[in-house]
């Protein structure tokens, strides 16, 4: 089939997308919400690759008065004068910020371009002073107040959460640069910042008492990402092409897309949102893959999970207040806030009476990708082969090979890095939880019966596994608990073969020491 849609995968320039004729999901109605409100300072926090840069690029072209690019879009119908305004676009996403000079080089390059454009002869080498001079000069030369757009304003800080010296250095540098937003307010029409989080202890937020954080606003919930209506309206052709390839109906493909890539929610009453990066990639490649997960690593999160000895099961179904999600203390980043702000958790429910949010993993892509990334940190599994190992375990469980399954489970814990401290029961629980979720079978941890709680319960087409795990005791004690508490009784009528496994985990050897299997 001849390709008729250009998806513009990875393209973040509104101008390029429109000039190339790429498919553009119209988000320009949000520009009207922003301009009509009359606010001066805005902040939007969203996970990586969620369309923040594209929206800022759209704002840039809008305030530059480039109406020809908006033909056929909502913005073209707005009551707007389309006069060009001076726009200062600060893109901090272009560097890794591992050296002292990285930020200065990025900002220096932008300053020189603006100084040339607005006829500024710098009177100082100080970056903050030069930036202030440019803002004033742009206003005086054009007669229009300046629009300042900052893409990933927090990138230098996020890149140095575990380097105290560099972190403090970049915090001071950014504080000096951003202080101009307040001191030059009379020359500024609007400041719009995007990033991962509204970080605490940074002057851009502590110094501006009237900044509007739209990250959790119902009316801006889908400012980035793709809603159900937008998917159906804009991706009909791509959905149909996927249906033809996989021999399914369009409806079946939409169900698959929803399961894999939908499920994000950024406000109390907002609708679910699809991951835009994954959607355009699956439409382009005609393959169901974990595109967003493979586009970046969760290294920062892994460091925090190890640091705080986190209970993964608890945090993946956490309930919290909005305050627990809104900001992030860079000196002591909370795992829950990091998981939400980076897109590994999202809002699943909101109790308006108590104003409590329930969080959860957004979709299958994130669950499978994130957990398979985490597994090698908790188990002796090669990073690139996590799912191959999991598929092997599934085959063993499917055919009732309990001994083979337990041998592989013992090998999984052998030689785990001492950093993970497997002698801690929490880390053992996390490792088993990750593995069980990846099995894609009916798996429950701490399954409740009338007589107690089964540590692990696994159900396949033909077999039911009841597994009890003891720490520094004996497999015999574990199997006796299964029998004495009649854990198998509720499943006797299921028509499946019941396999009981008593296990002992030795904190000394840091792996499974022995087990007993009864069928």
Image: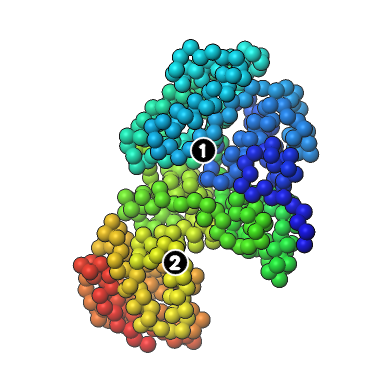
x then y, percent, for residue 73: 75, 38
User: How crowded is the residue under tag 2: few (<14 C-alpha within 10 Å), some, or many (20+)?
Assistant: few
Residue at (32% x, 34% y) in the render: 165
Residue 266 in picture, x, y percent from top left: 55, 45
Q: How many marks?
A: 2
Mark 2 vs mark 1: which is more N-terminal? 1
Measured along the vertical axis of the image, is residue 255 above or below residue 442? above
- Left or right, 113 with reference to 101: right
Q: Residue at x 45, y 31 (%)?
A: 103
Q: Quadrant of residue 134?
A: top right
Dot 2 and dot 1 residues touching (CB under 8 Å): no
Compare residues 424 and 267 and report the one nearer the observer: 424
Q: Return the residue nearer the eye: 294 or 480.
A: 294
Residue 391: image location, x then y, percent: 47, 73
Secondary structure category for the residue under label 1: loop
Q: Disc 2 designates what residue?
A: 385
Give the image's coloring scheme: rainbow
Residue placed at 72% from the left, 50% from the top? 6
Residue 377 vertical position relative to residue 9 in the rendered view, above or below: below
Q: Say whether residue 28 is left or right of residue 126.
A: right
* Residue 280 numbered mark, or none: none
Q: Residues within 10 Å of mark 1 (few under 14, many from 20)?
A: some
Residue at the disc numbered 1 = 93
Asked whether the viewer can see residue 494, the reply is no
**Of 259 and 193, the residue lying toward us:** 193
Q: Relative to 43, is 233 on the left or the right? A: right
Q: In which quarter of the image is the C terminus?
A: bottom left
Q: Which residue is drawn at 50% across and 18% down?
A: 130
The answer to whether any part of residue 312 appears in the image is yes
Q: Position of residue 204 (x, y in %)?
A: 46, 27
Badge 2 element: helix
């Amino acid at each position: 089939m001849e390709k008729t849609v250009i998806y513009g995968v990875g393209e973040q320039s509104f101008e390029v997308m429109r000039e190339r004729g790429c498919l553009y999901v119209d988000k320009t109605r949000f520009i009207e919400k922003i301009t009509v409100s009359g606010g001066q300072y805005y902040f939007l926090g969203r996970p990586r690759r969620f369309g923040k840069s594209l929206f800022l690029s759209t704002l840039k072209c809008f305030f530059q008065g480039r109406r020809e690019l908006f033909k056929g879009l909502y913005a073209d119908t707005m009551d707007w004068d389309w006069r060009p305004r001076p726009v200062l676009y600060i893109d901090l996403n272009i560097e890794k910020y591992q050296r002292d000079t990285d930020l200065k080089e990025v900002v220096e390059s932008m300053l020189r371009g603006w100084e040339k454009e607005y006829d500024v002869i710098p009177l100082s080498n100080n970056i903050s002073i030069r930036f202030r001079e440019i803002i004033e000069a742009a206003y005086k030369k054009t007669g229009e107040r300046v629009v300042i757009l900052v893409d990933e304003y927090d990138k230098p800080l996020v890149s140095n959460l575990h380097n105290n010296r560099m972190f403090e250095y970049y915090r001071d540098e950014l504080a000096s640069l951003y202080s101009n937003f307040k001191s030059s307010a009379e020359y500024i029409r609007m400041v719009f910042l995007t990033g991962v989080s509204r970080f605490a202890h940074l002057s851009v937020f502590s110094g501006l008492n009237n900044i509007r954080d739209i990250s959790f606003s119902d009316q801006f919930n889908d400012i980035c990402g793709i809603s159900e209506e937008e998917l159906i309206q804009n991706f009909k052709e791509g959905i149909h092409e996927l249906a033809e390839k996989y021999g399914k109906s369009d409806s079946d493909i939409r169900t698959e897309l929803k399961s894999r890539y939908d499920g994000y929610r950024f406000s109390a009453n907002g609708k679910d949102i699809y991951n835009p990066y994954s959607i355009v990639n699956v439409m382009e490649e005609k393959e169901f893959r974990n595109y967003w997960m493979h586009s970046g690593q969760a290294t920062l999160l892994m460091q925090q999970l190890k640091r705080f000895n986190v209970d993964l099961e608890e945090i993946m179904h956490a309930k919290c207040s909005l305050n627990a999600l809104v900001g992030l203390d860079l000196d002591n980043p909370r795992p829950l806030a990091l998981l939400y702000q980076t897109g590994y958790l999202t809002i699943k429910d909101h109790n308006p009476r108590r104003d409590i949010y329930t969080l959860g993993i957004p979709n299958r892509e994130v669950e499978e990708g994130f957990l398979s990334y985490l597994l090698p940190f908790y188990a002796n599994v090669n990073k690139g082969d996590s799912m191959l190992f999991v598929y092997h375990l599934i085959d063993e469980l499917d055919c009732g090979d309990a001994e083979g399954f337990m041998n592989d489970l013992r090998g999984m814990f052998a030689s785990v890095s001492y950093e993970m401290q497997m002698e801690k029961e929490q880390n053992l629980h996390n490792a088993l939880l990750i593995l069980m979720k990846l099995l894609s079978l009916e798996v429950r941890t701490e399954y409740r019966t009338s007589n107690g709680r089964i540590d692990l319960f696994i159900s396949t087409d033909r077999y039911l596994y009841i597994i009890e795990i003891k720490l520094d005791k004996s497999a015999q004690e574990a199997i006796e608990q299964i029998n004495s508490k009649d854990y198998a009784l509720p499943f006797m009528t299921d028509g499946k073969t019941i396999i009981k496994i008593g296990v002992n985990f030795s904190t000394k050897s840091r792996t499974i020491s022995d087990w007993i299997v009864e069928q």
